[in-house]
Image (cartoon, rainbow, N blue to C red):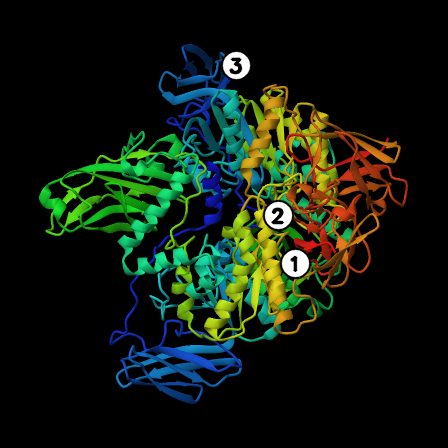
């Protein structure tokens, strides 16, 4: 699986897996009254009523005080309460106090300013520590009025009312800023120069995750096509083993449908197996082919049980499995999990039998070390006895498989990150959202769906926060190999989907980064310019700054004598070609990819680019800068690149 | 000089001190530092072995069944040559005298490479792309690596101070290998069928001059004054410093800066500069223009001395200076050091006087935090009688836009000083060739113009030392820096062109073009795998003689007036291709002056030819391609490698 595995390796970024956890914090007597986001050093959104909420005893009266105003509310039957404090101007520090009959909580050093939710995958998660000039930037970052809160990676099969753990707001400074999201931090730091108000940054992001994981179940149902997975996830929230069994049957169908694997059924123990020398990560086996292996591997073992054991309730412990697993007992799928944690699955009744039993595991490792390791593999019975599982063997499947992904997987599942990392923010006051995601959706088929998904995410989050939030979207940077001819690129499709979603929204801005990525590295380290371009978009969209939001945008393309005339608008100053005489990277296309061809382009006045073509009547589309890592050279006077686009020829 | 990743002056490490030649104790190793366990020796040629013994002692060396002996000289130095061996091993190398014996175990015979240059050669596998998987999968008994510690000296040394340790590639070791050198060797090992030994002698931020011997610099010309200064310094450092100070002052006067003599009495001193406690870098001073200031600044203070104090021998301590200082007392230069130890200079007799004394410290900072800073109690005069007098009341003035000359004993910017301590001690160790990745610190326009001759001089110099005509594989500098000033002269482009021309002129060298795999924002691009692969492609042609591969990629052969414009012809065996566009871009034509350069339209006309439309303007005499700090060029050869930057005359 070299090709796929290395793609995944690049996509997955810095990973620490955790799987959907079902438990939700309950309001113990000594639990905080206020929701987790209300912690010392919190920044609250200025100039709008301030929502404050939390948990108390059912029916208890709670009063909240800040900046001289008190509001109170009675907790409902579930203990939930909420009040709305009047709007405040930028400033502080204030103290936020909540009091019930039995408890009191004070949040200190509260500032009022602009609050940003920063979300997405690894490039949003990427810390200042790992960005360019880290040491200098961190050393000089002391700023009492920029604050950042990291929402720990977590997933849940159903929306949570609050975060599983306390959150910690950190004030920017030499000992803290290195762990801030670099894009979010540079964005806010830049904006603060214009607004001079405190900045609150909520960093809720997770490397390698697809957009589906960040949408609510409602939004995914509205989008359509996700019902089966959503139903399965709902089932998983109730009874994981039944959902896993159902998932396993789907998975088997997929396996049978692949040319490379059709006819083989490793879950029945079939095929060629080799002995596992030790239950360590497979990188440590000392076997060359696994030294840097990321991908899929089968494990199997057999275990003899007595009739008495087989009859009992049992759990199977498998130690640590890195990263995603599906488990069969006697040919029946019965467990599925993910993350680097210990696996313990309830064995459904009647699955075990007296005599020989077969345990088969499919393990998929996305990144770094992989395999089942850590020891403790055993069947544990209701009567307290157990039987160790040893004598493991492995089988390596053919390369190039693109496995279907379980709906509870953090990267590729449904709504599980929304449930655990966005829903608990409730109606927390925000000024806007910065979104940097899409690398994990940049396959050709996925990318075609992305515009609708991104627009749905705008709608979904605005609905949750009851706030017409502006969204600032980082368009994906250049990444991957160069191409000689015109190509159908999923990355280009995804960038265009981002551009179109932003253009269609009317309350969003795009930060083009096609010129500041790194062809060899999906994590470009120049986050400062990303932040600056996002801030520019925000200044335009929110604060009415006259500079363009994102640089030049395509207006139209019209047929002309001997070619096509493309008009660009919304740029600052004039357009110019950098480092060459003429603009590079223009294509004309008919209906099919095969008809796309590069054309000679000449920059005219007023944003007009003339494309030379012998048969302009055949052209229905213009593409610009259309490849995974295109080489484009058209900029405006402010130094913003003209981003990639495809538009129809009129 | 806080470390940052993006800076042209990428100083990876600070100064090493000039140390006295080591003395050999009776229990010191018999053989030189490279001859230790896991060493790789060059195959198919006589193998020189050297070391130190007692004066006149007989030394017997055995290797793979052969025995040779020699008597040590009066200085204890001995060397001999063992018969050549084919690739293979492991062997044991033994040296013994009547009283001592030393073994090097697990000796392999294969190809040995000297990998040298600045930070991009030092850059470890750990800091390269995909390092975790690369390191995990790196176990290979036949790739071995040894790193020479930073050291500098004003006299050539015949051995290293510290013991060296050869490391065998594997998950516990490869992380610290030079990434370029390792990826190169890993690629070469696939076809060379021989063990690979990597000797890495590199120093971040170093210019080329410290890597060339004084003798070669003398032949090269242009450094006479600095060579005089370093000769004086060698005899007596105080004389060298004084001489350097006078030379430096004449440089300052020629620059026409005000005040005319900032090291001495300044009229109207109160209006010049600002007060400072000198406790923090100048970036934190309340002047916006200093917030990210790199460059030169003066720190001045006055000290009142009694006649009794002035008469005594004294030492001036300044604490930390970031990065380079030249310190004057009463107008006389008393010390200059490179980055960044705490400075303490013994003052020559007669420098101090009763009454007012002026301490003036010129500081050069090339990146990040700069200046003289730290606790005030680090700055004082200490007299022979043990008494101390604080030096305080500092005033600071910046001198934007002026870069001072560097003292010739400074490790990374001096003359021959790294050569003396990091190349000369290699003696005549057998190498298959040299991989050279340097030049980032020689990219002003003036330096770019001088670089070709310097690189040719370095090649000749090292071949002379090692007494072998080994090949050089040169990494051409990658794209880095501004994308936006295409029609200004680019020092980086000049240095790249100097590298290309030096390689072509030399005839036993090859170029690895990296113009498309750098990072405009980071002088340390992390894709070292591709650099290594391209070096290996070059080596297979140049060193191993595999015919289908070209050594330095497609090269321009000629530019001639032709129908429809100017025809540029390339050497290649497969058709050229344009990436991501219809036509090749970034072609320029120029007349005599820079201002006449202009971008022109270019078309592929034939498999290996490009025709340029010369456009309007002065009659062109030169063609330039891909000529900028960070150009985005789109012409590739038939093997998928980029056509590199070049300038050729139209004939």
Mark 2 vs 1, N-terminal side: 2
Q: Position of residue B203 (x, y in %)?
A: 56, 40
Q: Chain of mark 2?
A: B
The CA distance from mark 2 to mark 1 is 18 Å
Q: Residue at x 63, y 66 (%)?
A: A536
| Figure label count | 3
Decide: few, some or many residues near mark 3? Use Cα within 10 Å; few <14, some 14-19, many ≥20: some
Q: Position of residue B648 (x, y in %)?
A: 79, 34
Q: B108 or B467: nearer the eye?
A: B108
Q: Position of residue B442 (x, y in %)?
A: 67, 42
Quarter containing the C terminus of chain A: bottom right
Q: B196 or A593: nearer the eye?
A: A593
State yes or no: discs 2 and 3 in contact (Cβ < 8 Å): no
Q: Which is more foreground, mark 2 or mark 1?
A: 2
For residue B325, side relative to residue B140 (left or right): right
* B37, above or below A392, in the image: above
Q: Residue at x 30, y 31 (%)?
A: A273
For disc 2, the marked residue is B9
> Could one spot residue B302 in this view of the protein?
no
Mark 3 vs 1, N-terminal side: 3
For disc 3, the marked residue is B46
Label for residue B262?
A: none
Q: Chain of mark 1?
A: B
Label 3: state its secondary structure.
loop
Q: Chain of mark 3?
A: B
> Could one spot residue A229 in this view of the protein?
yes
Decide: few, some or many residues near mark 1? Use Cα within 10 Å; few <14, some 14-19, many ≥20: many
Label 1: state its secondary structure.
strand
Mark 2 vs 3, N-terminal side: 2
Label for residue B297?
A: 1
């Amino acid at each position: 699986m070299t090709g796929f595995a290395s793609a995944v390796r690049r996509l997955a970024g810095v990973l620490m897996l955790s799987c959907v956890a079902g438990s939700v914090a309950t309001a113990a007597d000594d639990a905080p009254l206020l929701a987790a986001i209300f912690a010392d050093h919190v920044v609250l959104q200025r100039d709008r009523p301030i929502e404050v909420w939390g948990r108390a005893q059912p029916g208890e009266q709670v009063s909240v005080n800040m900046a001289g105003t008190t509001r109170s509310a009675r907790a409902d039957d579930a203990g939930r309460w909420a009040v709305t404090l009047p709007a405040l101007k930028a400033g502080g520090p204030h103290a936020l106090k909540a009091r019930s009959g039995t408890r009191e909580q004070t949040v200190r050093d509260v500032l009022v300013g602009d609050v940003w939710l920063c979300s997405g995958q690894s490039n949003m998660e990427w810390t200042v520590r790992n960005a360019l000039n880290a040491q200098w930037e961190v050393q000089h970052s002391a700023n009492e009025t920029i604050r950042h809160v990291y929402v720990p990676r977590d997933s849940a099969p159903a929306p949570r009312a609050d975060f599983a753990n306390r959150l910690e707001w950190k004030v920017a400074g030499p000992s803290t800023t290195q762990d801030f999201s670099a894009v979010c931090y540079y964005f806010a730091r830049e904006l603060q120069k214009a607004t001079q108000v405190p900045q609150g940054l909520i960093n809720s992001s997770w490397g390698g995750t697809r957009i589906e994981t960040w949408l609510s179940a409602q939004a995914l149902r509205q989008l359509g096509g996700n019902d089966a997975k959503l139903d399965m996830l709902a089932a998983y929230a109730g009874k994981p083993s039944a959902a896993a069994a159902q998932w396993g049957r789907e998975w088997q169908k997929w396996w049978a449908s692949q040319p490379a694997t059709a006819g083989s059924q490793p879950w029945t123990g079939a095929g060629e197996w080799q002995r596992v020398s030790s239950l360590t990560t497979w990188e440590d086996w000392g076997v060359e082919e696994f030294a840097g292996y990321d991908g899929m591997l089968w494990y199997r073992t057999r275990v003899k049980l007595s009739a008495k054991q087989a009859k009992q309730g049992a759990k199977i412990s498998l130690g640590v499995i890195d990263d995603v697993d599906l488990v069969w007992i006697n040919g029946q799928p019965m467990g599925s999990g993910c993350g680097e944690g210990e696996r313990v699955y309830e064995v459904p009744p009647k699955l075990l039998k007296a005599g020989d039993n077969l345990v088969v595991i499919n393990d998929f490792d996305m990144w770094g070390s992989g395999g089942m390791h850590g020891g403790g593999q055993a069947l544990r019975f209701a009567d307290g006895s157990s039987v160790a599982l040893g004598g493991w063997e492995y089988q390596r499947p053919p390369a190039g498989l693109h496995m279907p992904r379980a709906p509870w997987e953090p990267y590729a599942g449904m709504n599980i990150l929304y449930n655990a990392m966005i829903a608990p923010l409730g109606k927390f006051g925000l000024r806007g959202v910065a979104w940097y995601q899409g690398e994990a959706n940049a396959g050709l088929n996925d990318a075609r769906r992305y515009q609708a998904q991104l627009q749905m995410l705008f709608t979904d989050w605005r609905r949750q926060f009851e706030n017409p939030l502006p969204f600032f979207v980082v368009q994906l940077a250049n990444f991957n190999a160069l191409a000689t001819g015109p190509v159908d690129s999923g990355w280009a499709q995804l960038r265009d989907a981002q551009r179109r979603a932003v253009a269609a929204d009317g309350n969003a801005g795009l930060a083009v980064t096609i010129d500041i990525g790194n062809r060899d590295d999906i994590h470009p380290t120049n986050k400062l310019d990303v932040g600056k371009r996002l801030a520019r978009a925000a200044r335009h969209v929110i604060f009415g700054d006259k500079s363009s939001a994102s640089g030049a945008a395509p207006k139209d393309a019209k047929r002309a004598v001997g070619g096509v005339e493309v008009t660009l608008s919304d740029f600052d100053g004039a357009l110019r070609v950098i480092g060459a005489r003429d603009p590079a990277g223009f294509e004309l296309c008919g209906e099919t990819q095969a008809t796309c061809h590069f054309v000679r382009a000449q920059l005219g006045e007023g944003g007009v680019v003339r494309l030379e073509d012998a048969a302009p009547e055949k052209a229905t589309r213009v593409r610009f800068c259309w490849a995974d890592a295109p080489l484009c050279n058209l900029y405006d006077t402010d130094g913003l690149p003209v981003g990639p686009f495809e538009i129809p020829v009129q | 000089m806080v470390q940052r990743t993006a800076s042209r002056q990428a100083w990876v490490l600070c100064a090493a001190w000039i140390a006295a030649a080591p003395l050999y104790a009776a229990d010191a190793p018999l053989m030189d530092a490279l001859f230790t366990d896991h060493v790789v020796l060059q195959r198919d040629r006589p193998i020189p072995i050297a070391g130190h013994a007692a004066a006149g002692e007989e030394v017997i060396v055995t290797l793979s069944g052969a025995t040779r002996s020699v008597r040590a000289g009066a200085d204890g130095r001995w060397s001999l040559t063992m018969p050549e061996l084919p690739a293979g091993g492991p062997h044991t190398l033994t040296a013994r005298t009547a009283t001592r014996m030393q073994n090097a175990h697990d000796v392999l015979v294969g190809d040995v490479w000297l990998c040298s240059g600045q930070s991009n050669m030092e850059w470890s596998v750990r800091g390269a792309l995909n390092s975790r998987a690369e390191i995990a999968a790196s176990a290979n008994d036949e790739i071995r690596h040894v790193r020479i510690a930073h050291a500098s000296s004003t006299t050539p040394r015949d051995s290293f101070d510290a013991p060296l340790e050869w490391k065998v590639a594997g998950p516990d070791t490869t992380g610290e290998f030079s990434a370029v050198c390792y990826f190169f060797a890993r690629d070469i090992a696939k076809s060379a069928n021989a063990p690979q030994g990597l000797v890495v002698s590199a120093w971040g931020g170093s210019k080329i001059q410290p890597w060339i011997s004084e003798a070669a610099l003398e032949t090269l010309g242009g450094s006479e004054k600095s060579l005089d200064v370093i000769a004086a310094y060698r005899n007596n450092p105080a004389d060298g410093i004084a001489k350097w100070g006078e030379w430096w002052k004449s440089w300052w006067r020629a620059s026409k800066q005000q005040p005319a003599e900032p090291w001495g009495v300044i009229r109207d001193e109160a209006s010049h500069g600002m007060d400072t406690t000198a406790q923090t870098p100048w970036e934190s001073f309340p002047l916006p223009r200093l917030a990210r200031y790199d460059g030169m600044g003066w720190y001045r203070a006055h000290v009142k001395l009694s006649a009794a104090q002035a008469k005594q021998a004294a030492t001036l301590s300044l604490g930390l200076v970031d990065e380079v200082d030249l310190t004057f007392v009463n107008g006389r230069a008393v010390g200059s050091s490179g980055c960044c130890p705490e400075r303490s200079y013994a003052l020559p007799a007669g420098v101090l006087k009763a009454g007012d004394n002026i301490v003036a410290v010129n500081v050069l900072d090339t990146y990040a935090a700069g200046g003289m800073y730290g606790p005030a109690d680090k700055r004082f005069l200490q007299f022979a009688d043990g008494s101390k007098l604080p030096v305080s009341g500092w005033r600071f003035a910046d001198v934007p836009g002026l870069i001072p000359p560097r003292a010739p004993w400074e490790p990374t910017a001096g003359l021959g000083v790294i050569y003396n301590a990091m190349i000369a001690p290699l003696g005549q160790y057998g190498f298959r060739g040299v991989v050279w990745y340097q030049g980032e610190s020689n990219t002003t326009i003036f330096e770019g113009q001088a670089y070709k001759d310097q690189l040719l001089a370095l090649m000749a110099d090292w071949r002379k030392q090692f007494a072998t005509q080994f090949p050089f594989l040169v990494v051409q500098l990658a794209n880095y820096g501004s994308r936006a000033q295409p029609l200004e002269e680019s020092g980086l482009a000049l240095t790249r062109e100097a590298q290309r021309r030096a390689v072509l002129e030399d005839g036993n060298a090859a170029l690895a073009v990296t113009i498309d795999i750098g990072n405009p924002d980071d002088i340390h691009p992390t894709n070292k795998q591709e650099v290594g692969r391209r070096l290996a492609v070059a080596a297979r042609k140049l060193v191993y003689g595999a015919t289908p591969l070209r050594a330095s990629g497609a090269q321009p052969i000629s530019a001639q007036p032709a129908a429809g414009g100017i025809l540029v012809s390339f050497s290649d065996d497969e058709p050229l291709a344009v990436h991501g566009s219809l036509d090749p871009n970034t072609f320029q034509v120029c007349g005599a002056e820079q201002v006449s350069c202009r971008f022109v339209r270019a078309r592929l006309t034939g498999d290996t030819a490009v025709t340029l439309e010369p456009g309007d303007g002065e009659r062109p005499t030169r063609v330039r391609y891909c000529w900028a700090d960070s150009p985005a060029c789109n012409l590739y050869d038939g093997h998928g490698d980029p056509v590199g930057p070049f300038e050729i005359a139209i004939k």
